[in-house]
Amino acid sequence: MNIKSEYTDIPDNDTDKLIEVLGLTNNINEAGYILPDGSLLHLDRSNCIKRKNHLDILKLLPEFLSKNESILDTDMIKFMAKEQLVRFSIEGTVHTAAQPTSKQLRKIYKVLAYRSNPFEITLSNAVGMTLAQHTVSGPSMSVLVNVFKEYAEEGHFSEDEFCVEEDEQNFKLRFRPAMEVVGRINKKSKIIKMQPLFEKAMPLFMKLAKQSNNAQ
């Protein structure tokens, strides 16, 4: 059954390609992502043979087909931010990588407002840093608006996602989910170099580096 959407029949971006392959659904039990227009991407989640998990959709796209390494959660989150998708599971998960559109927010409210089971809402940024986590049950629209206001106040990151390592010359900030070094502090010059997308984590890096230094 075709479901009306704002997207055209000719795929010209990754979201259109996914719709062409997977289709849309009105059944929230089958949905895996909420698209910017509020429609639901069909992941066939009740079919134990055909169902897709949230990472599986990346394997349908050309840029990931040739990727030899494993696809990480951070790859999925970067894709969510680029395409402005909200990861969703009726079992109790809402995960955003950017400020939801007004239509996505209305869809989240419509789904969550009259359900008694708790939902965990996770806010990430485009590189996969966790900004906040909230558990809600039957939230009002005003509660949801306040939850997502944290995007405007971005700057609080989960310390559990970072660790400081060091060698003879540098303190290094490692972002665990992506398994990569994203910042360095030269021990002698005190010059700090950060990957551009992680610059807002600099205060956290300085704090962790100081703790590491004091522990020696």
Image: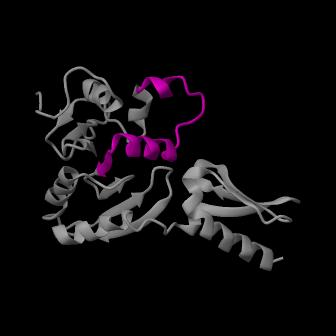
Image location (x, y in percent) of residue 136 = 27, 70
> Quick check: is 18 in the magenta stretch?
no
Q: Is residue 140 above or below residue 3?
A: below
Image location (x, y in percent) of residue 14 = 35, 30
Q: How is the image coloured?
A: one colour
Q: In this orientation, which residue lies closer to the viewer: 7 or 60?
A: 7
Q: Quadrant of the N terminus?
A: top left
Q: Is residue 3 left or right of residue 51?
A: left
The residue lying at 25 percent from left, 42 percent from top is: 35
Figure quadrant of residue 84: top left
The residue lying at 44 percent from left, 65 percent from top is: 154
Q: Is residue 70 left or right of residue 79?
A: right
Give the residues drawn in magenta, as a range.
61-88
Q: Is residue 199 above or below residue 139?
A: above
Image location (x, y in percent) of residue 174 = 67, 56
Q: Is residue 128 above or below residue 212?
A: above
Q: Residue furthest top?
A: 10
Q: Quadrant of the C terminus?
A: bottom right
